[in-house]
Amino acid sequence: MEQSSLIKPVLGGAYPTISHGQGVFLYDKNGKDYLDASSGAVTANIGHGVQEIIEAMVKQAKQVSFVYRSQFTSDAAEKLAGKIAELTKGELTYSFFVNSGSEATETALKIAIQHWQEKGKPKKQKIISRWMSYHGITMGALSMSGHPIRRERFTPLLESYPSVSPPYCYRCPLQLDQHTCGMACASELEASIRRIGSENIAAFIAEPVIGAAGGAIVPPDGYFQKLKKICEENDILFIADEVMTGFGRTGKMLASEYWDVEPDIVTLGKGMSGGYTPIAAAVMTKNVMEPIMKGSKSIIGGHTLSANPLSCAVSLAVLEYVERNELVEKSADRGNYLIRGLKKLAGKYSFIGDIRGRGLLIGIEFVLDKATKAPFPKDADVTNQIIELAMRNGILLYPAAAGLDGVTGAALIISPPLTISEEECAELLMRVDITFGQFNDSIG
Ligand code: PLP
């Protein structure tokens, strides 16, 4: 009987079946190697097949893999919460563990609402978010996501949370000049708050560097400071969604450190376990948790597998690995190396419109015309064409939405494991160059 795990077919057939992974490479059953330049979905931050993580996994599995979070805690969960508090700046001391980034952002949404309820402000229920954002696929998380393609089929079921324009300076949504705009896109938060009423708003959520919904869009300096100030002035919690940027990806432990803003809640996932096991978290400050701890004393949230000791032990081992091997610094370094290399390629290929990003979260936006920034026709499906060519050439790239409407643009993300060596970066650039060369030939 033919079996299928229902994954989308590419390359005109089925996905290759992967046999094993080591470092920055994955190998399929036919022996072909793939340089994992996307870390899967920007997840495999410490690369594949790391022996110490496997050992930590086996050690914990021999002790206990699962206990139910409403009956027990575990050393692994407590140590992981301690490590997260140590690695994050400021007052982020309370971790609530879940199993995916979507659950983490949805938990953050609920905790923000509960925070205000316990403070006697039950009307504060709405969330504000930005267009060109992705906070997850479950209904609450998707409601917060300004990602038109992923919202489209479910629109009637979703809340209309996104209302603020993104800091997409390559194509300013407000058609302003970056040097004179006064960050009008950040001021839109103020206007939104006035329209909705701060007495109705629990939180504002944003990704410090926009990932899948924009292709590594980095805001200008001062942008997040301005947003945080508006939140504070209006009694609105600031949630930083660091599911993609968390733990070293951008060259800082958390990307919000770049702008010295202290979020009230941070959401984490992906690189938190480097993909070795599912785990994610919403991490709160004392200020957020105090009314809940003095009030009902319990968070209305959580899942059966939340805080399971196996995932917690693996995540702890991954975070210790990141620290011990100075991967945050390496990410900044290798990111600069790759951006320099990609900018050289931008000089060679007319369809590369923009190279952007921080550390090893790098975006490339493709255009039909560099001068006018005109996008390729949507049905040319440029991003997927390039990704498929890349896969044939043994290099994995990650698609991103782009364009002012989040639909018409074409972009992708380069985000190899933070462990990548300089020689492997050179190999990555070579395989990208070959791929872009073939795409160039295909468009004549
Ligand atoms: N938040 C951000 C910023 C993400 O990039 C993602 C996934 O890409 C999510 C949330 C959702 O995470 P998950 O796919 O683990 O549910």
Image: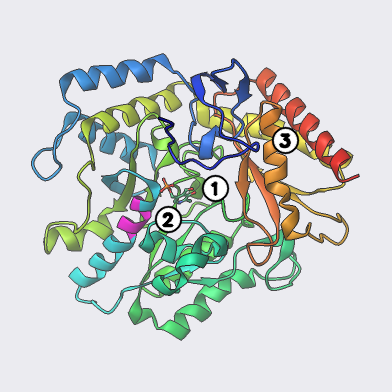
**Residue occupied by mark 3:** 389
Q: Secondary structure at mark 3?
A: helix
In percent of width and height, residue 434 lies at 80, 29
Q: Which of the 4 image quarters holds residue 221?
A: bottom right
Q: Is residue 406 left or right of residue 229?
A: right
Q: Write down the residue under mark 2.
A: 137
Give, as a three-letter code, the residue at label 1: Tyr
- Most prominent secondary structure in the magenta stretch? helix
Q: Considering the numbered disc 1 on the image, is that residue within a helix, a strand or a loop?
A: helix
Q: What residue appears at the point 33 percent right and 45 percent down from the top-left corner? A: 281
Q: Is mark 1 within 8 Å of ligand 1?
A: no
Q: Residues within 10 Å of mark 1 (few under 14, many from 20)?
A: some
Q: Is residue 184 above or below residue 223?
A: below
Determine which of the numbered discs, if any, sits on residue 435 in the image: none
What span is in magenta? 103-108
Question: 221 or 116: nearer the eye?
Answer: 116
Q: Earlier in the sequence, mark 3 or mark 1?
A: 1
Identify the residue under disc 1: 258
Amino acid tagged 2: Ile
Which residue is farthest left?
Answer: 71
**Could you say whether the residue bearing mark 2 is in a helix, strand or loop?**
loop
Say which of 131 and 254 sits in front.
Answer: 131
Where the C terminus falls, by quadrant? top right
- Which of label 3 and label 1 is nearer to you? 3
Lower position in the chain sequence, tag 2 or tag 1: 2
Image spot of residue 302 (x, y percent): 22, 51
Picture coordinates of residue 175, whole percent (x, y): 74, 72
Looking at numbered disc 3 in the image, what kind of residue is underneath it?
Leu
The x, y position of residue 385, in whole percent, is 72, 43
Eyeballing the image, is 164 above or below 386?
below
